[in-house]
Amino acid sequence: MCASLKFLAILICITLVSIVSANRESIGTLLGNRPSPSERYVSPFGWDDVLASLSTCKPFFTCKAPDPLPKCCAGAKYLVEKTKTKRDEQELCELLKSTLLQHLPGEYDPKRLPLLGEKCHINFYFPPVTNDTNCYN
């Protein structure tokens, strides 16, 4: 009887390990140990924030204006103020990438985005986002 219980316990452990491997979940997740809400990442801004904040930057991003408009700079400053961590910077990069490439396809000059910090007097580096940009480097 004791040997069969031991065998059953081993079988259960092997099954759990197989499930974890197949589903790529941690044992903690299987046991219900999920991160608390304070440990989960919550973006300080969304796609609509980026679009609204930088909508007046279109002439600058498309080389139709030599300098960004004051409202463009105000929007850029707003986004930078909300960017507190490296993860926030990565999220902003991804949102800039999707926003600029979706709304200004073929018009957007990637060399213009890094100029935004300098032209708007913001101490922040905006990367020249393209389809190939990896925001997590």
Image (cartoon, rainbow, N blue to C red):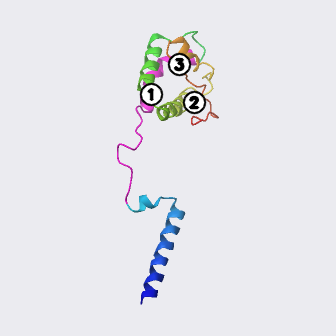
* Residue toward you, 92 or 56: 92
As drawn, the residue found furthest toward the front would be 2
Residue at point 58% right, 20% down? 114
Q: Is residue 59 visible?
A: no
Taking the magenta stretch, the answer to whether it contains residue 125 is: no
Relative height, residue 6 to residue 98 (above, below): below
Residue at point 44% right, 13% down? 71
Relative height, residue 108 to residue 94 (above, below): above
Residue on which disc 3 sits: 58
Pointer 3 with pointer 2, Cβ within 8 A: no
Residue on which disc 2 sits: 101
Pointer 1 with pointer 3, Cβ within 8 A: no
Q: Position of residue 21 (x, y in %)?
A: 54, 63
Circle nearer the N terminus (1, 3): 3
Residue at point 35% right, 42% down? 38
Give the residues in magenta: 32-61
Residue on which disc 1 sits: 83
Disc 1 residue crowd, few under 14, some 14–19, many 20+, Cα 10 Å: some
Pointer 2 with pointer 1, Cβ within 8 A: no
| Disc 3 residue type (three-letter) | Lys
| Disc 1 residue type (three-letter) | Thr
Query: Under tag 1, what secondary structure?
Result: loop
Circle nearer the N terminus (3, 2): 3
